[in-house]
Amino acid sequence: MTASNSKRATGLGIIRILISFVPLILTILLLVWGMFFIRSEQASKTPLPQTVIVAIALIWGVGGIVLLFFTGNIVIEQLPEKSARRAEPILFVGPALLMLTWALVIPTIRTLIASFYDQISKNFVGWKNYIYVFTNPNMLEVFRNNLLWLIFGTVFTVIAGLLIAVLADRSKFESPAKSMIFLPMAISFVGAGVIWNFVYALRPVDAPQIGLLNAIYVGLFHGQAQGWTTSYQPWNNFFLIVVEVWLQTGFAMVLFSAAIKGIPAEILEAARVDGANEIQVFFSIMLPTIAGTIITVSTTIVIFTLKIFDVVWVMTGGNFGSSVIGTEFYRQYFTYNQNGIGSAIAVVLFITVIPVMVYNLRQFARREAL
Protein backbone atom coordinates (compact mmCIF):
# COMPACT_ATOMS: atom_id res chain seq x y z
CA MET A 1 0.00 0.00 0.00
CA THR A 2 1.38 3.36 -1.02
CA ALA A 3 1.75 6.27 1.36
CA SER A 4 -1.14 8.12 -0.30
CA ASN A 5 -3.45 5.11 0.04
CA SER A 6 -2.42 4.71 3.68
CA LYS A 7 -3.21 8.34 4.41
CA ARG A 8 -6.53 7.98 2.60
CA ALA A 9 -7.44 4.88 4.61
CA THR A 10 -6.47 6.64 7.83
CA GLY A 11 -8.55 9.65 6.87
CA LEU A 12 -11.57 7.48 6.06
CA GLY A 13 -11.15 5.69 9.40
CA ILE A 14 -11.15 8.99 11.27
CA ILE A 15 -14.23 10.10 9.36
CA ARG A 16 -16.03 6.84 10.25
CA ILE A 17 -15.13 7.31 13.91
CA LEU A 18 -16.39 10.90 13.88
CA ILE A 19 -19.61 9.85 12.14
CA SER A 20 -20.12 7.06 14.71
CA PHE A 21 -20.14 9.69 17.46
CA VAL A 22 -23.14 11.45 15.90
CA PRO A 23 -25.80 8.92 17.11
CA LEU A 24 -24.20 8.89 20.58
CA ILE A 25 -24.26 12.69 20.85
CA LEU A 26 -27.86 12.81 19.61
CA THR A 27 -28.84 10.19 22.21
CA ILE A 28 -27.23 12.19 25.01
CA LEU A 29 -29.01 15.35 23.83
CA LEU A 30 -32.30 13.39 23.72
CA LEU A 31 -31.82 12.20 27.31
CA VAL A 32 -31.02 15.73 28.51
CA TRP A 33 -34.01 17.15 26.64
CA GLY A 34 -36.32 14.48 28.10
CA MET A 35 -35.20 15.34 31.65
CA PHE A 36 -35.93 19.05 31.20
CA PHE A 37 -39.20 18.26 29.39
CA ILE A 38 -40.51 16.14 32.27
CA ARG A 39 -39.47 18.75 34.85
CA SER A 40 -41.10 21.54 32.84
CA GLU A 41 -44.33 19.54 32.52
CA GLN A 42 -44.43 18.92 36.28
CA ALA A 43 -43.88 22.61 36.96
CA SER A 44 -46.31 23.76 34.28
CA LYS A 45 -49.65 25.34 35.18
CA THR A 46 -51.42 22.91 32.83
CA PRO A 47 -49.24 19.78 32.94
CA LEU A 48 -50.00 16.57 31.10
CA PRO A 49 -51.87 13.90 33.10
CA GLN A 50 -49.67 12.15 35.65
CA THR A 51 -50.10 8.76 33.93
CA VAL A 52 -48.87 10.24 30.65
CA ILE A 53 -45.82 11.78 32.36
CA VAL A 54 -45.02 8.45 34.03
CA ALA A 55 -45.32 6.61 30.70
CA ILE A 56 -43.06 9.15 28.98
CA ALA A 57 -40.54 8.89 31.83
CA LEU A 58 -40.45 5.09 31.56
CA ILE A 59 -40.07 5.09 27.78
CA TRP A 60 -37.53 7.90 27.89
CA GLY A 61 -35.55 6.37 30.76
CA VAL A 62 -35.43 2.72 29.75
CA GLY A 63 -35.36 3.34 26.01
CA GLY A 64 -32.79 6.09 26.39
CA ILE A 65 -30.40 3.87 28.37
CA VAL A 66 -30.72 1.04 25.83
CA LEU A 67 -30.13 3.50 23.00
CA LEU A 68 -27.17 4.98 24.85
CA PHE A 69 -25.42 1.63 25.14
CA PHE A 70 -26.30 0.71 21.53
CA THR A 71 -24.85 3.93 20.12
CA GLY A 72 -21.84 3.61 22.43
CA ASN A 73 -21.19 0.15 21.04
CA ILE A 74 -21.21 1.60 17.50
CA VAL A 75 -18.41 3.96 18.52
CA ILE A 76 -16.42 1.12 20.15
CA GLU A 77 -16.64 -0.99 16.97
CA GLN A 78 -15.12 1.81 14.89
CA LEU A 79 -12.12 2.37 17.15
CA PRO A 80 -8.76 0.57 16.86
CA GLU A 81 -8.32 -2.37 19.25
CA LYS A 82 -6.13 -0.56 21.81
CA SER A 83 -8.30 2.55 21.78
CA ALA A 84 -11.44 0.39 22.05
CA ARG A 85 -10.16 -1.31 25.22
CA ARG A 86 -9.46 2.08 26.79
CA ALA A 87 -12.77 3.60 25.69
CA GLU A 88 -15.03 0.70 26.79
CA PRO A 89 -15.01 1.57 30.53
CA ILE A 90 -15.65 5.24 29.75
CA LEU A 91 -18.54 4.65 27.35
CA PHE A 92 -20.27 1.83 29.24
CA VAL A 93 -19.53 2.69 32.90
CA GLY A 94 -19.27 6.44 32.43
CA PRO A 95 -23.02 7.07 31.96
CA ALA A 96 -23.82 5.11 35.14
CA LEU A 97 -21.22 7.12 37.07
CA LEU A 98 -22.64 10.36 35.69
CA MET A 99 -26.16 9.33 36.77
CA LEU A 100 -24.94 8.38 40.24
CA THR A 101 -23.13 11.71 40.47
CA TRP A 102 -26.24 13.58 39.38
CA ALA A 103 -28.65 11.62 41.58
CA LEU A 104 -26.49 11.01 44.68
CA VAL A 105 -23.24 12.96 44.88
CA ILE A 106 -24.58 16.38 43.89
CA PRO A 107 -27.67 16.17 46.19
CA THR A 108 -25.38 15.07 49.04
CA ILE A 109 -23.14 18.10 48.53
CA ARG A 110 -26.14 20.42 48.27
CA THR A 111 -27.59 18.97 51.49
CA LEU A 112 -24.27 19.46 53.26
CA ILE A 113 -24.14 23.09 52.14
CA ALA A 114 -27.80 23.69 53.10
CA SER A 115 -27.11 22.37 56.61
CA PHE A 116 -25.03 25.50 57.28
CA TYR A 117 -27.83 27.88 56.26
CA ASP A 118 -31.09 29.01 57.87
CA GLN A 119 -34.56 27.59 57.33
CA ILE A 120 -34.94 29.22 53.90
CA SER A 121 -31.36 28.39 52.81
CA LYS A 122 -30.51 32.07 52.45
CA ASN A 123 -28.48 33.22 55.45
CA PHE A 124 -25.32 31.42 56.59
CA VAL A 125 -25.62 30.30 60.23
CA GLY A 126 -22.51 28.14 60.60
CA TRP A 127 -22.79 25.27 63.10
CA LYS A 128 -26.05 26.54 64.61
CA ASN A 129 -28.16 23.76 63.06
CA TYR A 130 -25.79 21.05 64.30
CA ILE A 131 -25.75 22.57 67.79
CA TYR A 132 -29.55 22.38 67.75
CA VAL A 133 -29.47 18.77 66.56
CA PHE A 134 -27.17 17.63 69.39
CA THR A 135 -28.60 19.76 72.22
CA ASN A 136 -32.36 19.97 71.63
CA PRO A 137 -34.20 17.69 74.13
CA ASN A 138 -36.49 16.39 71.39
CA MET A 139 -33.49 15.43 69.24
CA LEU A 140 -31.85 13.69 72.19
CA GLU A 141 -35.02 11.62 72.54
CA VAL A 142 -34.79 10.82 68.83
CA PHE A 143 -31.19 9.61 69.21
CA ARG A 144 -32.20 7.52 72.21
CA ASN A 145 -34.93 5.84 70.19
CA ASN A 146 -32.56 5.14 67.31
CA LEU A 147 -30.13 3.63 69.80
CA LEU A 148 -32.90 1.32 71.03
CA TRP A 149 -33.62 0.28 67.45
CA LEU A 150 -29.92 -0.17 66.76
CA ILE A 151 -29.20 -2.38 69.76
CA PHE A 152 -32.37 -4.39 70.34
CA GLY A 153 -33.56 -4.53 66.73
CA THR A 154 -30.20 -5.90 65.57
CA VAL A 155 -29.66 -8.27 68.51
CA PHE A 156 -33.18 -9.77 68.46
CA THR A 157 -33.15 -10.18 64.68
CA VAL A 158 -29.73 -11.87 64.60
CA ILE A 159 -30.55 -14.20 67.51
CA ALA A 160 -33.96 -15.15 66.09
CA GLY A 161 -32.56 -15.72 62.60
CA LEU A 162 -29.67 -17.81 63.93
CA LEU A 163 -31.85 -19.98 66.19
CA ILE A 164 -34.40 -20.62 63.46
CA ALA A 165 -31.65 -21.46 60.95
CA VAL A 166 -30.09 -24.00 63.34
CA LEU A 167 -33.41 -25.57 64.35
CA ALA A 168 -34.89 -25.63 60.84
CA ASP A 169 -31.75 -27.31 59.52
CA ARG A 170 -32.74 -30.45 61.48
CA SER A 171 -36.45 -30.32 60.78
CA LYS A 172 -38.34 -32.50 58.31
CA PHE A 173 -40.36 -29.43 57.35
CA GLU A 174 -37.33 -27.22 56.70
CA SER A 175 -38.47 -25.78 53.35
CA PRO A 176 -42.08 -24.84 54.27
CA ALA A 177 -40.98 -23.53 57.68
CA LYS A 178 -38.31 -21.30 56.15
CA SER A 179 -40.73 -20.13 53.47
CA MET A 180 -43.26 -19.04 56.08
CA ILE A 181 -40.63 -17.20 58.12
CA PHE A 182 -39.16 -15.55 55.02
CA LEU A 183 -42.61 -14.50 53.76
CA PRO A 184 -42.64 -11.11 55.59
CA MET A 185 -39.64 -10.08 53.47
CA ALA A 186 -42.06 -9.88 50.52
CA ILE A 187 -44.07 -7.22 52.37
CA SER A 188 -43.08 -3.58 52.25
CA PHE A 189 -42.32 -1.72 55.48
CA VAL A 190 -45.46 0.36 54.93
CA GLY A 191 -47.56 -2.79 54.48
CA ALA A 192 -46.03 -4.30 57.62
CA GLY A 193 -46.89 -1.14 59.55
CA VAL A 194 -50.50 -1.36 58.42
CA ILE A 195 -50.70 -5.04 59.41
CA TRP A 196 -49.26 -4.44 62.86
CA ASN A 197 -51.51 -1.46 63.39
CA PHE A 198 -54.36 -3.98 63.38
CA VAL A 199 -52.43 -6.19 65.82
CA TYR A 200 -51.99 -3.28 68.27
CA ALA A 201 -55.37 -1.62 67.55
CA LEU A 202 -57.16 -0.11 70.55
CA ARG A 203 -60.89 0.53 70.75
CA PRO A 204 -62.96 2.01 73.62
CA VAL A 205 -63.17 -0.17 76.72
CA ASP A 206 -66.81 -1.10 76.18
CA ALA A 207 -66.27 -1.99 72.49
CA PRO A 208 -65.06 -5.35 71.13
CA GLN A 209 -61.32 -5.29 70.63
CA ILE A 210 -60.37 -5.94 67.01
CA GLY A 211 -56.64 -5.68 67.77
CA LEU A 212 -55.16 -9.16 68.13
CA LEU A 213 -52.96 -8.32 71.10
CA ASN A 214 -55.70 -6.51 73.01
CA ALA A 215 -58.20 -9.27 72.21
CA ILE A 216 -55.83 -11.84 73.70
CA TYR A 217 -54.98 -9.61 76.67
CA VAL A 218 -58.62 -8.86 77.48
CA GLY A 219 -59.98 -12.32 76.67
CA LEU A 220 -57.39 -14.51 78.38
CA PHE A 221 -56.02 -12.30 81.14
CA HIS A 222 -59.13 -10.20 81.76
CA GLY A 223 -57.03 -7.06 81.64
CA GLN A 224 -57.92 -3.65 80.31
CA ALA A 225 -57.18 -2.89 76.66
CA GLN A 226 -53.91 -1.00 76.25
CA GLY A 227 -52.50 1.49 73.76
CA TRP A 228 -49.36 -0.52 73.14
CA THR A 229 -47.74 1.97 70.75
CA THR A 230 -48.97 5.14 72.45
CA SER A 231 -48.49 4.47 76.17
CA TYR A 232 -45.59 3.24 78.28
CA GLN A 233 -43.07 5.65 76.76
CA PRO A 234 -40.29 4.88 75.90
CA TRP A 235 -41.16 1.19 76.12
CA ASN A 236 -43.66 1.61 73.29
CA ASN A 237 -40.63 1.68 70.98
CA PHE A 238 -40.14 -2.03 71.64
CA PHE A 239 -43.57 -2.79 70.17
CA LEU A 240 -42.40 -1.06 66.99
CA ILE A 241 -39.06 -2.88 67.06
CA VAL A 242 -41.01 -6.16 67.04
CA VAL A 243 -42.23 -5.26 63.54
CA GLU A 244 -38.67 -4.81 62.27
CA VAL A 245 -37.61 -8.11 63.85
CA TRP A 246 -40.61 -9.82 62.21
CA LEU A 247 -39.60 -8.38 58.83
CA GLN A 248 -35.86 -9.03 58.94
CA THR A 249 -35.66 -12.39 60.70
CA GLY A 250 -36.28 -14.21 57.42
CA PHE A 251 -33.39 -12.36 55.78
CA ALA A 252 -31.02 -13.28 58.62
CA MET A 253 -32.28 -16.88 58.68
CA VAL A 254 -31.57 -17.47 54.97
CA LEU A 255 -27.98 -16.22 55.20
CA PHE A 256 -27.27 -18.11 58.42
CA SER A 257 -28.80 -21.28 56.99
CA ALA A 258 -26.57 -21.08 53.92
CA ALA A 259 -23.50 -20.51 56.12
CA ILE A 260 -24.37 -23.44 58.39
CA LYS A 261 -24.84 -25.77 55.42
CA GLY A 262 -21.37 -24.73 54.26
CA ILE A 263 -19.76 -26.16 57.41
CA PRO A 264 -18.11 -29.51 56.50
CA ALA A 265 -20.16 -32.37 57.93
CA GLU A 266 -16.95 -34.22 58.85
CA ILE A 267 -16.01 -31.55 61.40
CA LEU A 268 -19.41 -31.71 63.09
CA GLU A 269 -19.41 -35.51 63.17
CA ALA A 270 -15.87 -35.60 64.57
CA ALA A 271 -16.89 -33.27 67.39
CA ARG A 272 -19.90 -35.42 68.22
CA VAL A 273 -17.77 -38.58 68.17
CA ASP A 274 -15.36 -36.92 70.61
CA GLY A 275 -18.24 -36.50 73.04
CA ALA A 276 -19.34 -32.91 72.40
CA ASN A 277 -23.05 -32.28 72.92
CA GLU A 278 -25.13 -30.12 70.59
CA ILE A 279 -24.68 -26.96 72.67
CA GLN A 280 -20.90 -27.41 72.63
CA VAL A 281 -20.96 -28.06 68.89
CA PHE A 282 -22.99 -24.89 68.37
CA PHE A 283 -20.76 -22.58 70.45
CA SER A 284 -17.39 -24.18 69.69
CA ILE A 285 -17.74 -25.01 65.99
CA MET A 286 -20.76 -23.42 64.34
CA LEU A 287 -20.47 -19.91 65.78
CA PRO A 288 -16.73 -19.46 65.08
CA THR A 289 -17.15 -20.87 61.57
CA ILE A 290 -19.98 -18.53 60.58
CA ALA A 291 -18.66 -15.50 62.51
CA GLY A 292 -18.09 -13.63 59.24
CA THR A 293 -21.69 -14.14 58.18
CA ILE A 294 -22.96 -13.04 61.60
CA ILE A 295 -20.97 -9.80 61.33
CA THR A 296 -22.18 -9.15 57.78
CA VAL A 297 -25.83 -9.75 58.69
CA SER A 298 -25.51 -7.63 61.82
CA THR A 299 -24.00 -4.66 59.98
CA THR A 300 -26.63 -4.90 57.25
CA ILE A 301 -29.44 -4.84 59.82
CA VAL A 302 -27.70 -1.96 61.62
CA ILE A 303 -28.00 0.07 58.40
CA PHE A 304 -31.71 -0.83 58.17
CA THR A 305 -32.34 0.25 61.75
CA LEU A 306 -30.43 3.51 61.38
CA LYS A 307 -32.54 4.44 58.36
CA ILE A 308 -35.85 3.19 59.78
CA PHE A 309 -38.73 5.44 58.79
CA ASP A 310 -41.70 3.67 57.23
CA VAL A 311 -42.76 1.53 60.18
CA VAL A 312 -42.61 4.40 62.69
CA TRP A 313 -44.34 6.86 60.38
CA VAL A 314 -47.20 4.50 59.51
CA MET A 315 -47.80 3.27 63.05
CA THR A 316 -47.29 6.37 65.22
CA GLY A 317 -46.29 9.22 62.90
CA GLY A 318 -43.29 9.73 65.17
CA ASN A 319 -45.56 10.78 68.04
CA PHE A 320 -45.80 9.43 71.61
CA GLY A 321 -42.03 9.53 72.10
CA SER A 322 -41.34 7.18 69.18
CA SER A 323 -39.71 9.54 66.69
CA VAL A 324 -36.45 8.41 65.06
CA ILE A 325 -33.92 10.22 62.89
CA GLY A 326 -35.80 9.47 59.68
CA THR A 327 -39.16 10.71 60.91
CA GLU A 328 -37.65 13.78 62.57
CA PHE A 329 -35.88 14.69 59.34
CA TYR A 330 -39.14 14.40 57.42
CA ARG A 331 -41.00 16.47 59.99
CA GLN A 332 -38.40 19.26 60.14
CA TYR A 333 -37.84 19.48 56.40
CA PHE A 334 -41.28 18.89 54.92
CA THR A 335 -43.70 19.76 57.75
CA TYR A 336 -41.97 22.65 59.49
CA ASN A 337 -40.02 23.82 56.39
CA GLN A 338 -36.82 24.00 58.44
CA ASN A 339 -34.44 23.36 55.54
CA GLY A 340 -31.28 23.96 57.56
CA ILE A 341 -32.17 21.74 60.51
CA GLY A 342 -33.61 19.05 58.23
CA SER A 343 -30.43 19.04 56.15
CA ALA A 344 -28.28 18.83 59.29
CA ILE A 345 -30.27 15.80 60.49
CA ALA A 346 -29.85 14.16 57.08
CA VAL A 347 -26.08 14.77 57.18
CA VAL A 348 -25.84 13.27 60.67
CA LEU A 349 -27.69 10.16 59.50
CA PHE A 350 -25.48 9.94 56.41
CA ILE A 351 -22.28 10.21 58.46
CA THR A 352 -23.58 7.59 60.91
CA VAL A 353 -24.28 5.08 58.15
CA ILE A 354 -20.98 5.57 56.26
CA PRO A 355 -18.66 3.60 58.65
CA VAL A 356 -20.99 0.60 58.66
CA MET A 357 -21.27 0.64 54.86
CA VAL A 358 -17.48 0.94 54.44
CA TYR A 359 -16.98 -2.01 56.79
CA ASN A 360 -19.52 -4.08 54.85
CA LEU A 361 -17.86 -3.27 51.52
CA ARG A 362 -14.45 -4.26 52.90
CA GLN A 363 -15.86 -7.55 54.15
CA PHE A 364 -17.37 -8.29 50.74
CA ALA A 365 -14.10 -7.36 48.99
CA ARG A 366 -12.13 -9.61 51.33
CA ARG A 367 -14.45 -12.54 50.59
CA GLU A 368 -14.13 -11.94 46.84
CA ALA A 369 -10.34 -11.95 47.21
CA LEU A 370 -10.47 -15.29 49.04
Image (spheres, grey):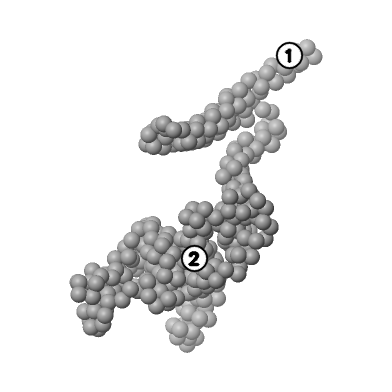
Up/down of 4 relative to 178, above or below = above
Location of the C terminus (image quadrant): bottom right
Q: Secondary structure at mark 2?
A: loop
| 223 or 155: nearer the viewer | 223
| Residue drawn at point x = 47 percent, y = 66 percent | 323
List the residue tagged with mark 2: 324
| 337 or 32: nearer the viewer | 337
The kind of residue tagged 1 is Arg
* Disc 1 residue crowd, few under 14, some 14–19, many 20+, Cα 10 Å: few
Quarter of image, res 288: bottom right
What number of labels is visible?
2
Q: Is residue 280 visible?
A: yes
Quarter of image, res 125: bottom right
List the residue tagged with mark 1: 8
Distance Cα–Cα, label 2 vs label 1 = 69 Å
| Residue drawn at point x = 35 percent, y = 58 percent | 191
| Residue drawn at point x = 66 percent, y = 32 percent | 84
Identify the mark nearer the N-term, 2 or 1: 1
The kind of residue tagged 2 is Val
Residue 40, position as x, y percentages in the image? 50, 33
Residue 163, position as x, y percentages in the image? 42, 75
Residue furthest right in the image:
3
Residue 114, position as x, y percentages in the image? 62, 51
Residue 357, position as x, y percentages in the image? 59, 60
| Residue drawn at point x = 31 percent, y = 70 percent | 200
